[in-house]
Image: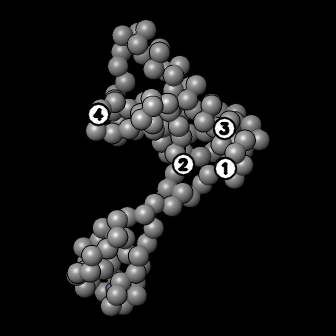
Amino acid sequence: MKVTFVSVKPVRSTRFTRLRGYASVELMGEFKIIKLRIIEKSDGRLYVVYPSIPESVYCDICGGKRFPKDRYCPSCGVECTIDMPKTQYREIAFPISGELNRKINVAVVREYNKIVAQERKNGTTHQNKG
Ligand SMILES: [Zn+2]
């Protein structure tokens, strides 16, 4: 499978976050994934993290679905008093093969480096788009 299009939006680097940008990719011109995150490892290398959502937990009173950060149950309205585990995130779209994972990483990091180099050359700095 080929990566046929890559779009990257760098974000302003800070020492508080390892997030360096967002990306979207198209595969074979037929499938698009948005909101990939570009993360800098402690050794300075960049890698791609696939879109994820927080995993649900369930209310002890009504069994309704809620997120760990909810202070009140969205189903029954009871205050959530039991300490919940830290929010766990689950990837919702990701390559199954290591080969495609490598292709996506190479394409995204190449585009990121190209844009950042252009911005440096032009004397512009990238904006933090959140
Ligand atoms: Zn409830």
| Earlier sequence position, callout 3 versus callout 1 | 1
Q: Is residue 3 left or right of residue 63?
A: right
| Earlier sequence position, callout 2 versus callout 1 | 2
Q: Which residue is mark 1?
A: 95
| Earlier sequence position, callout 4 versus callout 1 | 4
Q: Are marks 4 and 3 in contact (CB under 8 Å)?
A: no
- The picture places residue 103, in percent across and down from the top left corner, at 68, 36
Q: Is residue 110 left or right of residue 39?
A: right
User: Is any atom of residue 67 visible in this view?
Assistant: yes
Is residue 124 depicted above or below 19 in this figure? above
Across the whole image, how many numbered discs are drawn on residues? 4
Q: Are marks 2 and 1 in contact (CB under 8 Å)?
A: yes
Q: Which label was assigned to residue 50? A: 2
Could you tell me how far apart the alpha carbons at marks 4 and 1 are, in whole angstroms?
30 Å
Residue located at (46% from left, 60% from top): 89
Residue located at (54% from left, 57% from top): 91
Split into quadrants, the picture shows ligand 1 in the one at bottom left
Give the number of the mark in front: 4 or 1: 4
Could you tell me how far apart the alpha carbons at marks 2 and 3 are, in whole angstroms?
13 Å
Q: Which residue is mark 3?
A: 102
